[in-house]
Image (spheres, helix red, strand yellow):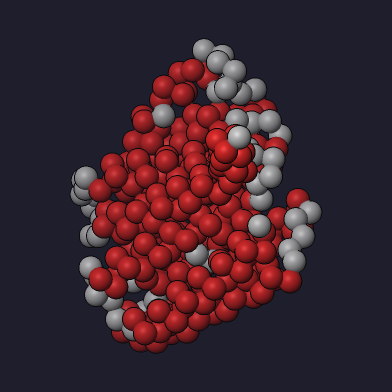
Amino acid sequence: MTNFLYLCTLKKIMWILLAVISSISLGFFDVFKKLSLERNNVFAVLLVNVLLCTIMVSPLTVMSLMGKSECSLSMQGHMLIAIKSLVVSISWLLGFASMKHLPLSISGSINAVRPILVLVGAIALFGERPNNTQWAGIILGFVSLLWVGFIGRREKTEKGLGKWLLFGILSIVLWAASGLYDKWLIAGGYTPLAIEAWYPFYQTVIMIVIVAIEHYYKKSIDRFHWNKNIIVISVFIIIADLAYFYSLTYPESLVSVASMIRRGSALVAFFYGAIVLKEKNLRLKIIDQIILIAGMTLIIIGSL
């Protein structure tokens, strides 16, 4: 009887555990992404990253081509996944460019606001209705974003961060749209394996076109330097995506809560930036992390 109750409880919270796995993976993805972008070409790094992801998930792609039920897609399904790839590619381009120029603790904090936008979208599109506790968390999330902007103004006098802050904000808006789109795809019957089998492939095609255009129109571009961290970020993003997709397959899962848990990854980026990179304005950034943790905690508690 005890084992049965344990299994029932584990099944009930499995989607939360998967979201936590995704969160931790995203935290390391952000850290190694920052390392891979140092003195490197943003477009080329992203192209190599998605190409490696495509190679890593190629067994799933082959299974899809063979008509395996878990991975198969109709022509309409391919079009929908291609749209997702386009949105994610633009978001990543803006996010990679932003992360290359912003302190890791700031870019991580900007990224952490993404689930707040997902929650707002979930209310409008999927009928998720937050209670008072969740609304308090939403408000704190936006306060966190405003605080990041304040920190950015303190630092841009030396680094000119205004444009990169804007890129980061645009990136999280598109990421939130992608997260809501994922929920819609899975609710429509598309499996996590089918999505993961094809969306890196379409990202690769999109990035090949973008890099070709960059080379054609720009006379002087940053040179690409191979960095082994690109392999690491490819592994972590695949783990993060699959864990997130599977968390959304559970009937009791809420995309708003899963996204909020997922963006706890900002804590990993913050500690790395503070301890290893020794970034400045840490007191201000600690305040932002406290606000972020408080908002995340309120949304999770309000959803239990």
Residue at horizontal 66%, vertical 74%? 136
Residue at horizontal 57%, vertical 22%? 70
Q: Does residue 225 appear left or right of residue 164 in this picture?
A: left
Residue at horizontal 49%, vertical 29%? 197
Q: Does residue 188 appear left or right of residue 99 in this picture?
A: right
Q: Percent from the top left, x then y, of residue 99?
A: 37, 63
Q: Nearer the viewer, residue 160 or 241?
A: 241
Q: Percent from the top left, x then y, of residue 54?
A: 40, 32
Q: Quadrant of the C terminus?
A: bottom right
Q: Does residue 297 appear left or right of residue 119 in this picture?
A: left
Q: Is residue 104 above or below residue 212?
A: below
Q: Does residue 298 appear left or right of residue 104 in this picture?
A: right
Q: Is residue 191 above or below residue 239?
A: above
Q: Percent from the top left, x then y, of residue 296?
A: 56, 66
Residue at horizontal 47%, vertical 77%? 290
Q: Quadrant of the N terminus?
A: top right
Q: Percent from the top left, x then y, of residue 263?
A: 49, 59
Label count reads: 0
| Res. 69 visible in picture | yes
Q: Quadrant of residue 41?
A: bottom left
Query: Given the current orientation, which residue lies at the most extreme top position?
Result: 66
Q: Nearer the viewer, residue 93 or 257?
A: 257
